[in-house]
Image: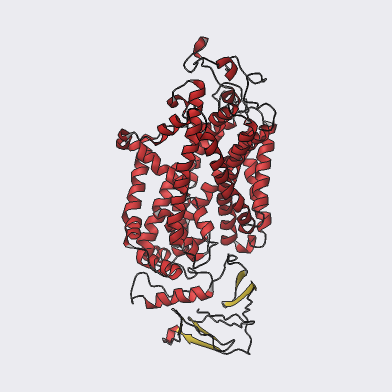
């Protein structure tokens, strides 16, 4: 929760994506690039999982589910369906040679062991990648088409889709819960779920795994939180969001547990097996256990369609955040290249990610996917989140960060958040990181052990998102001048373009800097007008900012209010030079501004140094600007 609050706060404050937001401390811009790289890699294999879901979804419309019997061409002699298993407990019965019986869903699954068979016809190792499975290639292409269509206009289009993808899973979960608890054996599964095993609390592995799960569940250090919060209104209550969203996420996970374990209890009852032998984790639960469970339900096709449609919408929803992290990062960091070409950028990135994901559709694709999942984010997420937390808490400064938050929501958070950002959260991340390193084992898939070259590829992926950190240390150091300490100090301070995007908010931000104590390490008056800004999320308002030669500022708002800035002589313009310590301000309501609106179109502004600001306001919208 502290990391969630941290990221949504500074993302909303600056209205910038993970790379450009590090104007707050340019020396650490590599954190943003690391987040984008993680999202880019995870998007590749995450959409492959969505493609598997589409494959199961389409096959759920058959009169007889393909994974319900052993009469298919891919089945092996080890297959044991419900008809042959009736009245028998074959869980621990083995065949000649030590092979175990397998259910039809196991044989059909994309996640079966290294034996050939199943949807992927999995090869015997990563050295033997085999050929492309055309049905999976088609599903992967379709998955990327869905992503492109939903993000064709960025958050404007995805925002509408999210109304469906965010609510539909809750509806299906409720339906599946009602159905699940009415199945025989469901109560046993739920008891297994809710009765705690207290001795496990003494196992450090449990705590480390729980902490890692938090990174994945709330999306800390992925960049998606920063990206999505950058589209919030400046005065959105991000403190409330930081409390409600993680709690809602946790409550959803708990409720989903009741749904899943009611099905697991039913499976154990049907097979006569102990619940422990049925319980699995990760994708195996989605693509093995649940498909097997729906076979035993009346109208199994209906439950299968609902379940995989739910999984598809959940996956698509997660993909939106990661993909938008990439597109927003490029448009914010390189606006002259991509600001007006976001459609082409989205199409290009979708195409590139699709091509990079093609190896996952091959016979040995599951081995490639396992490498990406194993190495792409485990260590880098912790390193990036630790650095992010330390930079904001100790270099940018908690006190200054509190003032930024107060500027947005009207009050400062309590002391607890400061303690978390300064001490508790960094120490927790260090503990999890050290424990993960100690417990780390080379990547495996089932019993298959990867060759050294494949492990090296995995570590290359892991390091790729960390390299930008030291790389930008070097770049920013050489871009600055002065002695060594002066260079480092200058690049750790916020840049002159750091601050809120809209001028009315930027004016209030500068006022807080002016009120800071003289000589404070956080005081930096080298602030210029907002040079770039993404389209604001406020309904009916779109703000565009352009900077020219001498920092003349032009802004246009469309929707219900229009205001245009230009150098027009019909308006009264009053400016004060901070260099000469002249200061004009008018307090309206509860907010002090360096500007006042008198009559309809009187405009007052404060000018720093030699920056000129000319504006004119039309319509009935009063425009307050401080520079």
In the image as oriented, which residue stretches furthest toward the top?
96
- Taking depth in this image into account, of 88 and 343 the one nearest to the observer is 88
Numbered circles on residues, count: 0
- Taking depth in this image into account, of 353 and 316 the one nearest to the observer is 316
Residue at point 37%, 38% (across, down): 437
Residue 270 screen position, x and y as percent: 52, 23
> In the rendered image, is residue 370 in sight?
no
Residue 401 screen position, x and y as percent: 39, 65
Residue 573 screen position, x and y as percent: 56, 88
* Res 169 quadrant in image: top right
> In the rendered image, is residue 618 in sight?
yes
In the image as oriented, which residue stretches furthest toward the front?
182
Residue 93 screen position, x and y as percent: 48, 14
* Res 603 quadrant in image: bottom right
- Taking depth in this image into account, of 598 and 480 the one nearest to the observer is 598
Above-or-below relation of 472 to 290: below
Above-or-below relation of 224 to 370: below
Scheme by which the image is coloured? secondary structure
* Res 43 quadrant in image: top right
Q: Is residue 449 left or right of residue 110?
A: left
Above-or-below relation of 105 to 22: above
């Amino acid at each position: 929760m502290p990391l969630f609050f941290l990221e949504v706060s500074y993302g909303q404050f600056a209205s910038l994506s993970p790379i450009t937001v590090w104007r707050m401390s340019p020396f650490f811009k590599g954190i943003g690039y690391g987040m984008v790289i993680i999202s880019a890699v995870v998007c590749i294999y995450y959409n492959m999982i969505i493609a598997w879901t589409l494959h199961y979804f389409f096959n759920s419309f058959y009169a007889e589910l393909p994974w319900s019997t052993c009469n298919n061409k891919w089945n092996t002699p080890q297959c044991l369906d419900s008809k042959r298993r009736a009245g028998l407990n074959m869980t621990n019965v083995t065949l000649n040679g030590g092979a175990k019986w397998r259910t039809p869903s196991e044989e059909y699954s994309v996640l079966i062991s290294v034996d050939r068979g199943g949807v992927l016809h999995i090869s015997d190792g990563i050295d033997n990648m085999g050929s492309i499975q055309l049905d999976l290639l088609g599903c992967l292409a379709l998955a990327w088409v869905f992503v492109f269509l939903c993000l064709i206009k960025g958050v404007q289009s995805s925002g509408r889709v999210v109304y469906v993808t965010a609510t539909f899973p809750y509806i299906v979960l409720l339906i599946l819960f009602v159905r699940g608890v009415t199945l025989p054996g469901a109560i046993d599964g739920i008891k297994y779920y809710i009765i705690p095993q207290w001795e496990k609390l003494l196992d450090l592995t449990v705590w480390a795994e729980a902490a890692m799960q938090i990174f994945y569940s709330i999306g800390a250090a992925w960049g998606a939180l920063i990206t999505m919060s950058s589209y919030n209104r400046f005065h959105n209550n991000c403190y409330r969001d930081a409390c409600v969203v993680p709690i809602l996420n946790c409550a959803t996970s708990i409720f989903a547990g009741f749904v899943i374990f009611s099905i697991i209890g039913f499976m154990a009852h049907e097979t006569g097996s102990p619940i422990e032998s049925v319980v699995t984790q990760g994708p195996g639960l989605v693509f093995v256990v649940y498909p097997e469970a729906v076979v035993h339900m009346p109208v199994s096709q209906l439950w299968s369609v609902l379940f995989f449609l739910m999984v598809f919408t959940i996956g698509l929803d997660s993909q939106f955040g990661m993909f938008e992290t990439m597109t927003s990062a490029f448009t914010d960091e390189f606006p002259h290249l991509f600001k007006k070409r976001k459609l082409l950028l989205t199409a290009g990135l979708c195409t590139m990610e699709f091509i990079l994901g093609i190896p996952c559709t091959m016979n040995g694709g599951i081995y490639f996917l396992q490498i990406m999942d194993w190495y792409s984010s485990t260590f880098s997420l912790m390193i990036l989140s630790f650095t992010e937390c330390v930079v904001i808490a100790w270099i940018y400064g908690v006190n200054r960060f509190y003032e930024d938050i107060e500027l947005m929501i009207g009050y400062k958070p309590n002391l607890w958040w400061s303690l978390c950002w300064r001490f508790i959260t960094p120490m927790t991340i260090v503990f999890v990181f050290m424990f993960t390193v100690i417990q780390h084992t080379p990547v495996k898939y089932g019993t298959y052990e990867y060759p050294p070259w494949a492990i090296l590829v995995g570590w290359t992926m892991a390091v790729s998102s960390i390299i930008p950190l030291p790389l930008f240390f070097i770049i920013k150091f050489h871009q600055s001048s002065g002695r060594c300490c002066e260079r480092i100090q200058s690049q750790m301070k916020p840049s002159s373009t750091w601050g809120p995007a809209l001028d009315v908010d930027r004016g209030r931000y500068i006022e807080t800097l002016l009120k800071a104590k003289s000589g404070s390490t956080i005081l930096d008056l080298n602030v210029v007008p907002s040079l770039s800004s993404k389209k604001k999320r406020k309904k009916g308002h779109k703000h565009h900012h352009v900077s020219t030669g001498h920092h003349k500022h032009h802004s246009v708002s469309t929707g219900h209010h229009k205001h245009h800035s230009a150098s027009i002589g019909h308006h009264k313009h009053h400016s004060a030079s901070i260099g000469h310590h002249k200061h004009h301000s008018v307090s309206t309501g509860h907010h002090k501004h360096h500007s006042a609106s008198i009559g309809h179109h009187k405009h007052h502004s404060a000018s720093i140094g030699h920056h000129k600001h000319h504006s004119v306001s039309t319509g009935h919208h009063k425009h307050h600007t401080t520079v």
